[in-house]
Image: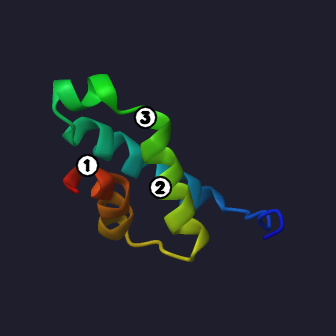
Amino acid sequence: MGPAKPVNYDLDTVALMRETLDEAWARLRPQERAVTPKSSLAVRILETAAQGERDPQRLLDAALSELAA
C-alpha cells in the first residue's frame, strides 16, 4: 500500500476537530489521561474526518472508541 493521499480541511472542519479533541480529552478520567496520549485521540479524529465524517458526535465516538474496548 502506497503513501496516503493528503487531505485538506477547511477552517470550519479544523475548528470542529479541535473542539472534538478538547471534548474527548475532557471526558477522560485522570487515570485515563495518564496513559492515553492526546495525540492518539487526535489521530482517530483525523482518520475519521479523512473518510468524510463531519458529525461532531461521530468524531467524538471515534476518538474514544479504543478506550471503550
Using the image, tell me which numbered label, if any, was put on residue 44. 2
Does residue 9 lie above or below 25 as drawn?
below
Where is residue 67 drawn, in percent x and y?
Answer: 25, 49
Q: Check whether the beta carbons of the residues at disc 1 and disc 2 lie within 8 A of each other.
A: no
Where is residue 49 drawn, in percent x and y?
Answer: 54, 66
Please name the residue that numbered disc 3 is placed on.
Answer: 38
Identify residue type, mark 1: Leu
SS for tag 1?
Answer: helix
Identify residue type, mark 2: Arg
Q: How far apart are the alpha carbons under marks 2 and 3?
A: 10 Å
Please name the residue that numbered disc 1 is placed on.
Answer: 67
- Please identify the quarter of the rendering in which residue 6 is found: bottom right
Identify residue type, mark 3: Lys
Considering only order in the chain, which callout, 3 or 1, is on the residue closer to the N terminus?
3
> Coloring scheme of the render?
rainbow
Residue in the image at 40% along x and 45% along y: 21
Q: Check whether the beta carbons of the residues at disc 2 and disc 3 lie within 8 A of each other.
A: no
Residue in the image at 18% along x and 24% along y: 30
SS for tag 3?
Answer: helix
Where is residue 61 drawn, in percent x and y?
Answer: 29, 62
